[in-house]
Image (tube, rainbow, N blue to C red):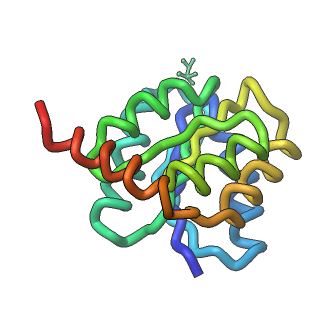
Amino acid sequence: MLTIAIGADHAGYPLKEKIKDFLLLKNYRVLDFGTNSTESTHYPLFAREVCLSIQRGESQRGILICGTGIGMSIASNKFKGIRSALCFNEYMARMSRKHNDANVLCLGSRVIGEELAFSIVEAWLSADFEGGRHTQRVELIKQMESTP
Ligand code: RB5
């Protein structure tokens, strides 16, 4: 079973708690990197912790939540080996796995409702990378990580 690192800022915190319960019910292992309240904080701090957890190999996937999901996606895509996808529906979530091999899912708690968020997470976790022609494209992205 996958280990999923999860993180959110104050705007994403309530949805993070719900998604954490959803994942635990489905028997995923969850590493929660905060935040743990609705007190104002800074989303890059939590993006960093989730990405470092994946880089260390202690988790295979990450889920990051802020108000729009945009800040989390910008911040997480700065980390080597992280392919982070901001998804607003199940189709985007599925395709981010099949074509982009996304290992981080970003959600906007002020953009989508709780039920849609669960469906997106489920679609994302159920889909696999298709490989084939997409492997070369992901490799091209990896090459960019080592160029200035
Ligand atoms: C916080 O107000 C908000 O800016 C943050 O959650 C996020 O939406 C940033 O991208």
Q: Is residue 46 above or below residue 28?
A: above
Q: Position of residue 81 (x, y in %)?
A: 31, 53
Does residue 29 appear to the left or right of 135 in the view shown?
right
* Residue name at image x 59 percent, y 55 percent: 97
The quarter in which the N terminus is drawn is bottom right
As rendered, which of 123 and 147 lies closer to the eye? Answer: 147
Q: How many numbered badges does the structure rendering display?
A: 0
Farthest front residue in view = 133
Kindly indicate the quadrant of the structure image that contains residue 23. bottom right
The quarter in which the C terminus is drawn is top left
Q: Is residue 35 above or below residue 30?
A: above
Q: Is residue 109 above or below residue 55?
A: above
Kindly indicate the quadrant of the structure image that contains residue 113. top right
Q: Position of residue 6 (x, y in %)?
A: 54, 54
* Residue name at image x 30 percent, y 60 percent: 55
Farthest left residue in view = 148
Does residue 17 appear to the left or right of 96 in the view shown?
right
Q: Position of residue 132 (x, y in %)?
A: 50, 62
As rendered, which of 75 and 21 lies closer to the eye? Answer: 75
Q: Position of residue 82 (x, y in %)?
A: 37, 49
Split into quadrants, the picture shows ligand 1 in the one at top right
* Residue name at image x 38 percent, y 37 percent: 77
* Residue name at image x 60 percent, y 47 percent: 96
